[in-house]
């Protein structure tokens, strides 16, 4: 059973990725390309549905799908590929997505979780061999920041807030 | 200068702790070199040819005396007693021990310094005009805005893993002393018709293997929109900049491939959508930061001729190594790091200590680093100039060659850098020896030599009046010469004059080029102006006159 970091808690993952043997009616994460290939099949999916964006998928393409989606997974193929940070902020701040926003992929390491959480990811599916306890502790490496950001990280003080007041 | 508050201090302290843990995991084998690299780079730590290299940030080139003394102390205790100042106003230590770096960063944090984001694919040290705040022709002091940008860019959650490094320079004077047009973003302070402060924004400049001059993306950006507009540019770049090829990943390639108009459309469209959710830059915050850069408590003095009755060497130093100040009775004084026989930009710990102490005595305890790899004491009373000169002369820091041919920029080259194809320091020595006659240097006047040991162009060779690029030819060091580059005010890229020359021929080739200039120049005409007037051809002929067979 995969364990993920969700809102500062290490929990058993109740979602499956396509190909991990999900049963009809379960919570399933489908790559965007699969979603587009057979939209009818996924419209009829009776369980919760999530979509997985690769780092080159433009997030705006999901606009019309978001009401149907309980989860968006954004892929980080390496720690150095930072496109997913912009995708997350756009999903939260521009497209108003309120479901689970999950970072996935080989690039999701403990040294990234602070930034991920601040961009609006509330679920972190760590790369293989990463220690979830260390990742949870890494959320608290900083208690100050210069920029505004998601309330997923508890900060004592920020300098530039994006929200008035 | 800016003083940390509790947030700033807490941030750098947390950062040191984070890096200490990352280093521990690396040394324990939990983080492979590949995994550790992006983390250490974002803390200024390279692994170089012989040893690690640590690049310490000097934000917009401003140092307090106690900070320079701390750098001296660190270089002495953790390195070999010297450091190298760079074109981006930072300091590099070439021989620290890997395991010592967390301790060095902790030492830096005790004097409000760090090495954050001095390398890696993120926003780098924000640089400025070294005459900021004292230049007579300045619109506004760029440093408060540099400090605001520094804070905004520090561990930015969205922009810490960009496609490639990202450099920003801010200038407030018509003369560009920060090479802002060859930065990823150049910001020129200006005022609109109503007198409000804002910026002309340039984007897509850069050197490296594809040198490009930045283009104007916005004529006037109001100050309150500074951060929201930077976020829009960075977001378009972060999403659409190339990540498949390291050599095509800078923003200049994106701007070039889209064209400035389409790139502008994308940025402006992004900005319209994100402006309201972007970080605010409240007037109170601007005022808070500006408060740290108020003019010094200058005395009411009158200008006087500090050279009257003094020896010729002092007069030469006054003429070449000091600059006008907007306040009567003061001058800005260069601390020349270009003494012949020394590596350009290098400074010993003893020299740093002595200059820190001199700054305490004669320049309000502040020191600046310059893009040209010298230091500057910005606020020296004219009546203290002679004393300052005596001390700098004693320290070997009064070489009266600022602005002349031997005040050259050079990267560390093959002697230190693992990227270099050829040495730069030996060539610098060769040029210093060939041009060791001050009267000859003065006769040649303003000539900028800029030299890089590889096409990454850390030595800005593209924008030197005379550019020198080290190349590897079948395992030998050869040098390509270009002419006509410029980075201040009238930015231009130099043109390669012909086949590269062997190492032993570099100084001779330059000598023939400047001799061609002496033969061609009109009365009082500078090298670069003669070159622009007559074109490259006569110089090319001169350069190869006795050396036609250079491969």
Image: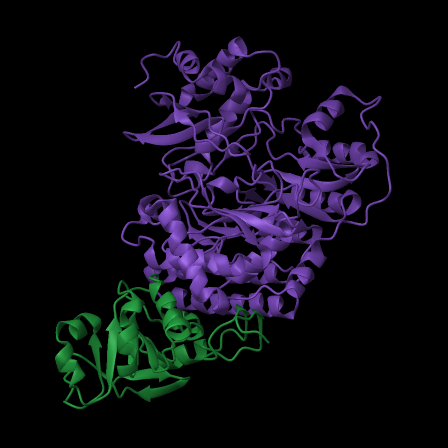
Chain colours: A green, B purple
Q: In the rendered image of this protein, does residue B118 appear above or below residue B174?
A: below
Q: In the rendered image of this protein, does residue A26 appear above or below residue B348?
A: below
Which image quarter: residue A16? bottom left
Looking at the picture, tell me which residue is in the foreground, B433 or B480: B480
* Residue B114 is at least partly visible in this image: no
The residue shown at (25%, 85%) is: A15
Q: Position of residue B162 (x, y in %)?
A: 39, 57
* Left or right: B473, with B192 as reference point: left
* Left or right: B454, with B183 as reference point: left
Looking at the picture, tell me which residue is in the foreground, B172 or B132: B172
Q: In the rendered image of this protein, does residue B342 appear above or below residue A40?
A: above
Looking at the picture, tell me which residue is in the foreground, B24 or A56: A56
The quadrant of the picture occupied by the N terminus of chain B is: bottom right
**How many marks overall?**
0
Q: In the rendered image of this protein, does residue B346 appear above or below residue B185?
A: above
Q: Position of residue B72 (x, y in %)?
A: 63, 49
* Left or right: B225, with B484 as reference point: right
The quadrant of the picture occupied by the C terminus of chain B is: top left
The residue shown at (26%, 65%) is: A57
Q: Position of residue B214 (x, y in %)?
A: 45, 41
Q: Position of residue B247 (x, y in %)?
A: 32, 45
* Residue B232 is at least partly visible in this image: yes
Which image quarter: residue B300? top right
Looking at the picture, tell me which residue is in the foreground, A80 or A88: A88
């Amino acid at each position: 059973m995969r364990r993920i970091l969700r809102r500062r808690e290490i929990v058993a993952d109740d979602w499956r990725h396509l190909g991990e043997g999900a049963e009809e009616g379960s919570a399933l994460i489908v790559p965007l390309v699969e979603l587009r290939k057979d939209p009818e099949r996924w419209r009829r999916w009776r369980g919760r549905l999530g979509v997985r964006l690769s780092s080159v998928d433009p997030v705006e393409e999901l606009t019309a799908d978001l009401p149907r989606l309980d989860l968006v997974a954004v892929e980080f193929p390496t720690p150095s590929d930072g496109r997913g940070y912009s995708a997350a902020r756009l999903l939260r701040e521009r497209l108003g997505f309120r479901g689970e926003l999950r970072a996935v992929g080989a690039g999701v390491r403990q040294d990234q979780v602070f930034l991920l959480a601040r961009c609006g990811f509330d679920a972190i599916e760590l790369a293989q061999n990463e220690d979830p306890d260390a990742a949870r502790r890494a959320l608290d490496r900083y208690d100050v920041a210069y920029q505004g950001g998601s309330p997923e990280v508890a900060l004592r003080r920020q300098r530039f807030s994006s929200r008035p007041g | 200068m800016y003083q940390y508050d509790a947030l700033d201090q807490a941030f750098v302290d947390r950062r040191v702790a984070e890096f200490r843990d990352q280093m521990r995991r690396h040394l324990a084998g939990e983080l492979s070199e590949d995994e550790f690299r992006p983390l250490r780079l974002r803390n200024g730590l390279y692994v170089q040819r012989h040893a690690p290299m640590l690049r310490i940030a000097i934000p917009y080139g401003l140092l307090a005396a106690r900070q320079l003394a701390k750098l001296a102390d660190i270089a002495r205790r953790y390195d070999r007693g010297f450091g190298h100042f760079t074109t981006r106003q930072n300091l590099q230590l070439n021989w620290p021990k890997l395991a010592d770096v967390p301790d060095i960063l902790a030492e830096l944090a005790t004097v409000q310094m760090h090495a954050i984001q001095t390398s890696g694919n993120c926003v780098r040290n924000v640089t400025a005009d070294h005459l900021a705040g004292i230049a007579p022709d300045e619109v506004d002091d760029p440093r408060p805005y540099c400090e605001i940008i520094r804070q905004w860019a520090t561990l930015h959650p969205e922009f810490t893993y960009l496609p490639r490094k990202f450099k920003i320079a801010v200038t407030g004077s018509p003369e560009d002393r920060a090479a802002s047009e060859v930065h990823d973003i150049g910001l020129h302070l200006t005022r609109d018709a109503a007198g409000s402060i804002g910026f002309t924004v340039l984007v897509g400049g850069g050197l490296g293997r594809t040198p490009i001059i930045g283009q104007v993306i916005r004529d006037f950006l109001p100050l309150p929109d500074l951060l929201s507009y930077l976020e829009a540019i960075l977001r378009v770049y972060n999403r659409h900049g190339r990540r498949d090829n390291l050599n095509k990943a800078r923003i200049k390639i994106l701007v070039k491939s889209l064209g400035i108009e389409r790139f502008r459309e994308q940025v402006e469209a992004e900005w319209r959508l994100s402006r309201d959710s972007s970080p605010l830059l409240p007037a109170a915050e601007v005022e808070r930061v500006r408060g740290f850069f108020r003019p010094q408590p200058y005395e009411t003095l009158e200008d006087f001729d500090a050279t009257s009755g003094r020896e010729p060497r002092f007069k030469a130093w006054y003429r070449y190594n000091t600059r006008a100040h907007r306040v009567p009775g003061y001058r800005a004084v260069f601390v020349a790091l270009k003494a012949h026989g020394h590596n350009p930009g290098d400074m010993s710990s003893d020299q740093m200590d002595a200059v820190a102490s001199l700054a305490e005595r004669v320049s309000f305890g502040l020191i600046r680093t310059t893009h040209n790899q010298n230091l500057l004491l910005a606020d020296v009373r004219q009546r203290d100039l002679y004393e300052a000169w005596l001390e700098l002369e004693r320290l070997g820091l009064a070489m009266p060659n600022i602005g002349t041919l031997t005040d050259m920029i050079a990267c560390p080259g093959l002697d230190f850098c693992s990227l270099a194809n050829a040495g730069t320091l030996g060539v610098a020595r060769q040029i210093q020896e060939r041009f060791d006659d001050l009267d000859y240097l003065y006769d040649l006047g303003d000539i900028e030599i800029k030299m890089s040991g590889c096409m990454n162009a850390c030595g800005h060779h593209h924008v030197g009046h005379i550019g020198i690029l080290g190349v590897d030819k079948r395992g030998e060091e050869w040098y390509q010469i270009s002419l006509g580059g410029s980075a201040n005010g009238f930015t231009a890229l130099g043109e390669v004059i012909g086949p590269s020359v062997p190492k032993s021929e570099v100084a001779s080739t330059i000598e023939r080029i400047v001799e061609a200039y002496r033969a061609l120049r009109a009365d009082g005409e500078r090298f670069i102006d003669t070159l622009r007037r007559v074109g490259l051809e006569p110089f090319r002929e001169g350069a190869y006159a006795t050396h036609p067979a250079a491969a």
